[in-house]
Image: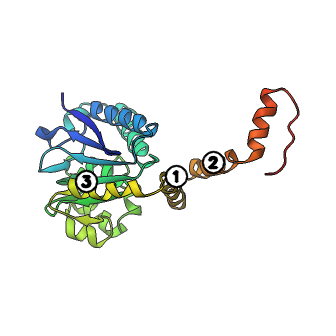
Amino acid sequence: MSDVTLHVEAGVAVLTLDNPSKLNALTMGMLDTLGNHLDALEIRTDVRGVILTGAGAKAFCCGADIAEWGPLTPSEFARHWVRRGHRVFDRLARLHLPTIAALNGHAFGGGLELASACDIRVVAPTATLALPEARVGVVPGWSGTQRLLRLLPEPVVKEMALFGRRISADRAAAFGYVAEIADDALSLAQDIAAQLSGLSPHATEVSKSMIHASQGEDRAAMVEALGGAAIAASEDRAEGVAAFLNKRPAEFSGQ
């Protein structure tokens, strides 16, 4: 069954959307599998970075599978489809590991929104970006009008969402949405990810948290996580835990 595959090698995890017969259109099953992989990667200690790509040469992801969401009632569409996608995409955006989207082909609708949840993006020169939802009578539902606006100028997002225009790889790079363009986007992403082996994983994780907090990406949780990490390294925290377990008053030193 077409799904999402996970392969880990040399500290780099590669997640591949594997539904090429439908241009890697996202199904409910694929969303669930992607979410499960992300949960597993969050706690692995042998992974330093994550690459997300698509199977085949035509598309990274052409969006959500209309055959999946088309028959849903309005309530089911809003409650299950839109919210499920948001949960998984938010999970990707907030993964503590550095993430790279390798756009081997076109990224439309939900595919563009998925790429936007990664830290950086590299693309093939023939890839284009689009928000074509209005062509089928719907609107972007997985952060295309929210997170994407932090990565592209508002007029460009309007150009795609309101007028149905596609953005080329070169133009996306000019806006800073794309880090680099290469014929083999996956190989380039692997080269970039390989550099993580020479960096401190704690430093990259904290840097990502601080950057996200400044941009409003899960700001409350990021602030508390950073504060919790700082206090966890203190002698007071060790003393407080020891005192509780030994049923005695704590003697805090302020260290």
Q: In terms of image quadrants, where is residue 184? A: bottom left
The residue under the point 12% across, 50% down is 57
Q: In the drawing, what numbered circle is on residue 202?
A: 1
How far apart marks 3 and 1 lie (CA) works out to 24 Å
Q: CB atoms at circles 2 and 3 under 8 Å apart?
A: no
Amino acid type shown at disc 2? Ala
Does label 3 or label 1 sit earlier along the sequence? 3
Bin the neighbour count of mark 2 within 10 Å (Cα to Cα): few under 14, some 14-19, many 20 and up.
few
Q: Secondary structure at mark 3?
A: strand
Q: Is residue 137 visible?
A: no
Foreground disc of the pair 3, 1: 1
Element under disc 1? helix
Amino acid type of the residue that numbered disc 3 sits on in the rendered structure: Ala
Q: Earlier in the sequence, mark 2 or mark 3?
A: 3
Residue 14, position as x, y percentages in the image: 28, 44
Rendered residue at 43%/48% (across/down): 97
Q: Is residue 85 visible?
A: yes
Q: Quadrant of residue 128?
A: bottom left
Crowding near the residue tagged with mark 3, few <14, some 14–19, many ≥20 C-alpha atoms within 10 Å: many
Q: Quadrant of the N terminus?
A: top left
Callout 1: few (<14), some (14-19), or many (20+) C-alpha neighbours within 10 Å?
Answer: few
Q: Which disc, if any, is residue 229?
A: 2
Q: Horizontal placement of 186 versus 216: left or right?
A: left
Name the element at disc 2: helix
The residue lying toward the viewer, choosing from 35 and 41, is 41
Residue at 51% across / 59% down in the picture?
Answer: 207
Q: Amino acid at mark 1?
A: His
Horizontal and vertical percent position of residue 255: 79, 51
Residue tagged by mark 3? 102
Circle 2 or circle 1, nearest the eye: 1
